[in-house]
Amino acid sequence: MQNRNLSVLDDDRIGRLLVKLTLPAFFGMFVMTLYNVVDTIFIGQYVGPLGIAGLSIVFPLQMFSMGIGMMMGMGGASLISRLIGANNIPRAEHALGNAFSGTVILSAIVMIVGLSNVDFWLRIMGASDTILPYARDYMRIILFGMFFMTFTMSMNTLIRSEGNARVPMIGMILGAGLNIVLDAIFIIPLDMGVRGAALATVIAQFIASIYFLSYHLTKKSFLKLLPKNLIIQWQIMRDILAIGISALSMVVAGSIASVFVNRLLVSYGGDIHIAAFGVLHRIMMFALMPGMVIGQGLQPILGFNYGARRYDRALKAIRIGITYASVISIVAFVALYFSPETFLRIFTTDTELVAVSVYAAKRVFLVMPLIGLMMVGQLIFQAIGKVIQAIVSSLSRSALFLLPTVLIFPRFWGIDGVWLAFPVTDVLTLVLVVGLLTPVLLDFSRKSKPSGLEPEKFNLPTPPVKLG
């Protein structure tokens, strides 16, 4: 059993610790993203563009489910890391239990509401008459497994908050590997189409959920999931939601924006453009991943050192995280912008769909080198408990910038306006994030201890954490 008076986060070697937390997080996030991407690949190859379009229509709902998991996971993780940094382990365990309970309750509500009228929700999300049968078959099964999707997302982040990135990585690899195998079985020999893809996803996430739950019910975890801590304590839940709501808001805004994008693509283009957006959205998930994963690896380090008032280490962690994310984003830009067809043909061999997707990719991925800095900057606010900044920066990309631009631009440039709304949105979001982040960095710099002073150790008394 791990020493309860020592956290792996109590490490002066920030760069090495960030790599230690980020690499497993990257592999975990990579395979987690494969859940939906693999479904799309199999559907594209064995069902066709309309099948991809059906998955694209349902994707905002899946994003919303993941958003609930991110809200409880990131909100709980931010609180837990700061409490560990302040050496308040009992309250950190209470936060873990409350995050677990909140995940269960909210995911059950989404499942019940969604199943109440499937066709109604699909029409709102932009399903045409030709796409509706595919979307309906996929959504019904996905809704029954909604809890497992939300739970894996939440526990993935909560476990990482105590400095353990290996278990989330294994859980995600386990689920994604099983998803690929089941997709191949259900879609190819059993010819179950989109229903097979949905069933494969639900079963895979169920197995991953069991694995994550077993970790906290054994003696392997640093924090324990105790029955008494499952009882909601409103002060703790308020602190979790105060930070986590920014993650949910970001995803909800993204889901709403996706709905509008789908509807506009039908108006200015057609079903083939929805299919193209579905493929590009999956690729975009990988493009956003470096910044998101490095931000998630940075979160426990930053939260711990912020809770322990080690502002010099916090600044160093931020500097290293932003550098790593920016370099990776530039590499991704070179690969996806100059050779998009290579990646698009993984999803489909349909000539028209590939041509439309290549054309769109040249516009959507135009400012990808900025993505790393933008994503890390947004996650910094969540890590240190800056509620207002976290909410504003999370909402800015989809709600503040993407929605207006995607509604206005097509009136002047047609289908090009839909695609160009994405790079313009990324530039505006980056400007806002940098503007919000600058005062925080200046404050950290001012509070940093002069070099040469011995930093306080984890097991010494520290000032209480100011939450929210």
Image (cartoon, rainbow, N blue to C red):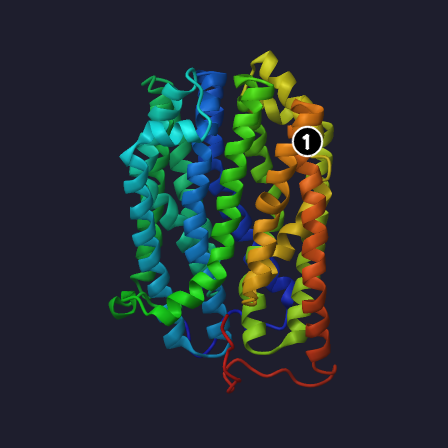
Residue type (three-letter) at the residue carrying disc 1: Phe
Left or right: 205 in relation to 360: left
Q: Tell me if 453 is positioned left or right of 278 in this view.
A: right
Q: In this view, does 400 lie above or below 382?
A: above
- Number of numbered callouts drawn: 1
Q: Which of 314 and 174 is in front in this view?
A: 314
Q: Is residue 360 above or below residue 34?
A: above
Say which quadrant the N terminus sits in: bottom left
At horizontal 52% and vertical 26% (from top left) the residue drawn is: 263
Residue 232 relative to residue 179: left or right:
left
* 459 shown above or below 236: below
Question: Residue 296: percent from the left, percent from the top?
Answer: 55, 56
Whether residue 12 appears in this view of the structure is yes
Residue 457 vs residue 299, the one in the foreground: 299
Q: How crowded is mark 1: few (under 14 residues within 10 Å), some or many (20 or more)?
A: some
**Quick one: which residue is furthest to the top in this view?**
351
Please state the horizontal and vertical placement of residue 349, each as a whole percent of the image. Answer: 56, 15
Hey, which quadrant is residue 62 in on the image? top left
Q: Could you tell me residue 17's position as x and y percent?
A: 59, 64
Please tell me which residue is depicted at 63% across the width and 34% down the height of the picture.
406
286 and 441: which one is in front? 441
Name the residue furthest left. Answer: 227
Give the residue displayed 63% in from the left and 73% down from the top.
12
Write down the quadrant of residue 364 in the picture: top right
Q: Which residue is drawn at 45% across and 68% down?
A: 80
Q: Label 1 belongs to which residue?
A: 409
